Image (cartoon, rainbow, N blue to C red):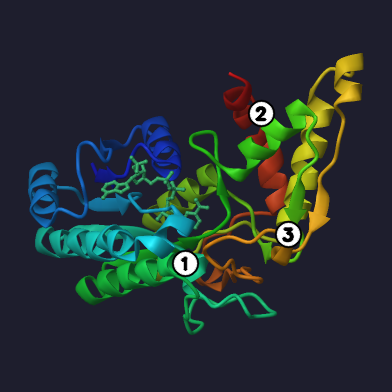
Amino acid sequence: MTRWLVTGAAGMLGRDLTDLLRLRGAEFTALARADLDIADARAVTAAVSSVKPDIVVNCAAWTAVDAAEEHEAQALAVNGRGAGNLAAACANAGALLVHPSTDYVFDGHAAIPYPEDAPTGPAGAYGRGKLAGEQAVRAALPGASYIVRTAWLYGAHGKNFVKTMLRLAANGTAPGVVADQHGQPTWTADVAEQVLALLEKSAPPGVYHATSSGQTTWFGFAEEIFRLYHSSVARDEDAERKRVAPRPISTAEYPTPAQRPAYSVLGHDAWRAAGIEPIGDWRDALHRAFPAILAQASG
Ligand SMILES: NC(=O)c1ccc[n+]([C@@H]2O[C@H](COP(=O)([O-])OP(=O)(O)OC[C@H]3O[C@@H](n4cnc5c(N)ncnc54)[C@H](OP(=O)(O)O)[C@@H]3O)[C@@H](O)[C@H]2O)c1
């Protein structure tokens, strides 16, 4: 039986991936940050030698995009060298590596979806670190790695945009939400399914874009979350009083330390070439994910 090793297993994607592996009856070892720091090369070698995995999925990452601007060296130690440590250990052990990456490796100035082989050009420290990780993985495992870029992730576990909007909707607070950044809101459970599909279909190694189909803005995404929230709560007097909607604002009205890409839509041709359906429409994914996230957020 195929043996899996998941790093960063307590993160948002790590939780959904290990839930799916459990559901499928797979044999896997889940290591959270407290069990394995991927920036520690010796610990990574020891973990891979002891687990003897066939497949490693690296869900560990420094994901604090704004903090990375001030702490680029620390972000790079995890997202660049940490990925390289895992890749080297996989190369020694003959294991495949699935390495999630990000839309932030692109410059964000395109007007049509970025193909998998589009030139990279990160605008910030987080993207530079993640790109260094991609390069390290590809260099060590050219024929035995999958770079799985994703974006705008949300899920039942961990902090994310959907949970923030649900909290505001429940309080009756109408947020200003950026309406001039375009992307693909993506459910972590869908990314987990795509990772399994790569292995089940023996897809060729390379770069894949695990994002929802279609596109929207953060404002469009927020509108749909508020709509779903309002249709799922009882229509009593209190709910009616608190019924608000987000309002559109510009990026200039919401300054952040790290520059956000204006256009972060990723193309999906590599899935089709490998005989795998890309993730479906973002709105449909949100509707499927919503009950579990609402239960978590209000629990
Ligand atoms: N979230 C997004 O919107 C988004 C967008 C594009 C791409 N991605 C990529 O998708 C992947 C999964 O992201 P996510 O949203 O699941 O992130 P997450 O919820 O922040 O999970 C990352 C996990 O990695 C752990 N970690 C941090 N440093 C580590 C280290 N040195 N060694 C081992 N574990 C470490 C974190 O632990 P602590 O919590 O204890 O620090 C956390 O449990 C990442 O590769 C990320 O770059 C995410």
Quarter of the figure with the N terminus:
top left
Which of the two residues, 70 or 104, is positioned nearer the viewer here?
Answer: 70
Residues at marks 3 and 1 touching, judged by CB atoms closer than 8 Å? no
As measured in the structure, the alpha-carbon distance from the residue carrying label 3 to the one carrying label 2 is 22 Å
Q: Residue furthest bottom?
A: 119
Which of the two residues, 225 or 53, is positioned nearer the viewer here?
Answer: 225
Residue 9 placement, left or right of 126 = left
Picture coordinates of residue 297, whole percent (x, y): 60, 27
Q: Mark yes or no: residue 137 visible.
A: yes
For label 1, the residue is: 208
**For the residue marked with disc 2, what is the amino acid?**
Pro
Q: Residue at x 18, y 48 (%)?
A: 53
Q: Earlier in the sequence, mark 3 or mark 1?
A: 1
Q: Residue at x 72, y 34 (%)?
A: 168
**For the residue marked with disc 1, what is the amino acid?**
Tyr
For label 3, the residue is: 217
